[in-house]
Image (spheres, grey):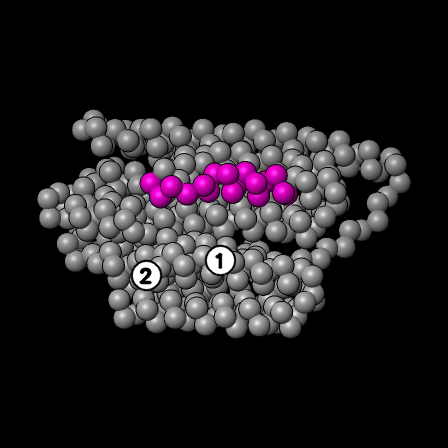
Amino acid sequence: MFKKSVLLYLLLAIGLVLSACGQSDQGSKEDQSKEETTQGDSEEKSSEENGSESEEANDKEEDADFVAAYKKGKEELAKAGEGEKVDYQKVIDLYNNQLQPLVAKRDGKIDQQISTALEAGKNGEMDGQVVKQIFDKLTQKVFYLTIKHEFHEIDENWGKKEVVKEEIAEAKEFYEVLKETVEKRDAAYETNMVDQIDAGFNEIEKAVENDDNLGFQLGKQVVDKTLMKTFYLAAGAVPNGYATKAAKEAEEDPDKAKVEQAEGWAFYQSISEYITKYAEEDAKIIEKNFNLETDVKELDPEAVNHAFVRGLSKVALHEYEESEEYWGEDKSVITALEGALFIDMIASDIKRMQGEETYTTLNEQAQTYLDAVKSDEKEKAMEVLEKIEGTLHSIIERSKAA
């Protein structure tokens, strides 16, 4: 399937290591309070609004071009799976002329990864179906990062309703591309993530109308973390993650398994930064298994899944630590919600490993803690937080022993 070459080694060198950049505007790390500057006289304001409208129209047209280029490239690359000849130069030109500016702006490493994969496909040094997965899933990461960027822009422009509404519209336009991925996971795991994301956007729009910045921050976290859950379910969850699929396929069809391994790796890139930051050893396990240099027959889906469970549990613990540290501030409420959302990411794993009752209790405790933070009931909050942390630590230990 692969010919060793300079291009392939380059891809492995830059692509199959964890990126340290690309999610610089994580919700819990952003400043949650913004001061708006006083506005000038009416003539200046009118001029500014006209300029803003023109810029917004251009942005909307650009966004549509990015999405169209992605769809065209994906459609051409899909021919590899149908035994048809792929016009790689067409995709390369499409990428360089229409999509690359956005990719490079969001994450220069992704730009290198996609460009190198396309060239490797053109030169016959990488299987076309693997190339397609790298192009497809890494571009999805770029669209995910763009949604996060639009949220950051909303923060920056808070108080300017028309500008903010346009940023929301742009975020939703990029989400429409990712929605199919979310729907597939909902069908596979009987989850309701599409409804959750819709509710998050509704909360954001309501918050803008009511000038409720905290409401916006909470809605933003629901959208962001539910998309992260989608990527986790696609990559490492049991039984329908690509780690499990690739391992099952490895004996009968190694080539197909290799494609699934590439899909798992590419989906993982959208959440790798979080796990690397707070659970480096667990991240290394996931990366080693998904790395295309790893023989797919040696891929251990249980090790991948348990590393994800430990990693996401550790991220949840970090969010709760921050919630306690920033008690009395909006950030305490925001990180309390983030902790609950990271617990929700591994809901099916907790049920499988420790039983339905354990998850139900933990979920209720997470809600109780969030409510207590909102109502400034610190004694009650600290009491339940101790129980949450104890359960998360037990989940981590259980996933080591399993």
Can residue 67 be seen here? The reply is: yes
- Name the secondary structure under disc 1: helix
Vertically, is 388 above or below 103? below
Choose top left, top right, bottom left or bottom right for residue 171: top right
- Image coordinates of residue 377 in percent, x first then y, are 68, 67
- Image coordinates of residue 336 in percent, x first then y, are 58, 61
> Mark 2, residues whose alpha carbon is within 10 Å: few (<14), some, or many (≥20)?
some
Choose top left, top right, bottom left or bottom right for residue 115: top left
Figure disc tally:
2
Choose top left, top right, bottom left or bottom right for residue 308: bottom left
- Image coordinates of residue 297 in percent, x first then y, are 15, 54
Q: Which disc number belongs to residue 353?
A: 2
Left or right? Give the position of 322 relative to 134: right
Q: What residue do we see at 13% from left, 43% from top?
A: 253
Vertically, is 306 above or below 231? below
- Looking at numbered disc 1 in the image, what kind of residue is underneath it? Asn
Q: Which quarter shows the N terminus?
A: top left
Q: What residue do we see at 23% from left, 32% from top?
A: 80
Report the span colored magenta. 188-204
Can residue 19 be seen here? The reply is: no
The residue to which callout 1 is attached is: 363
Left or right? Give the position of 167 relative to 305: right
Q: Which quarter shows the C terminus?
A: bottom left
- Looking at numbered disc 2 in the image, what kind of residue is underneath it? Met
Q: Which residue lies furthest to the front in this view?
A: 357
Q: Residue furthest left?
A: 252
Q: Which disc number belongs to residue 310?
A: none
Which of marks 1 and 2 precedes in the sequence?
A: 2
Magenta stretch: residue 199 in it? yes
Q: What residue do we see at 35% from left, 62% from top?
A: 354
The span from disc 2 to disc 1 (Cα, nearest Å) is 15 Å
Along the line of sight, which residue is nearer the eye, 9 or 168?
A: 168
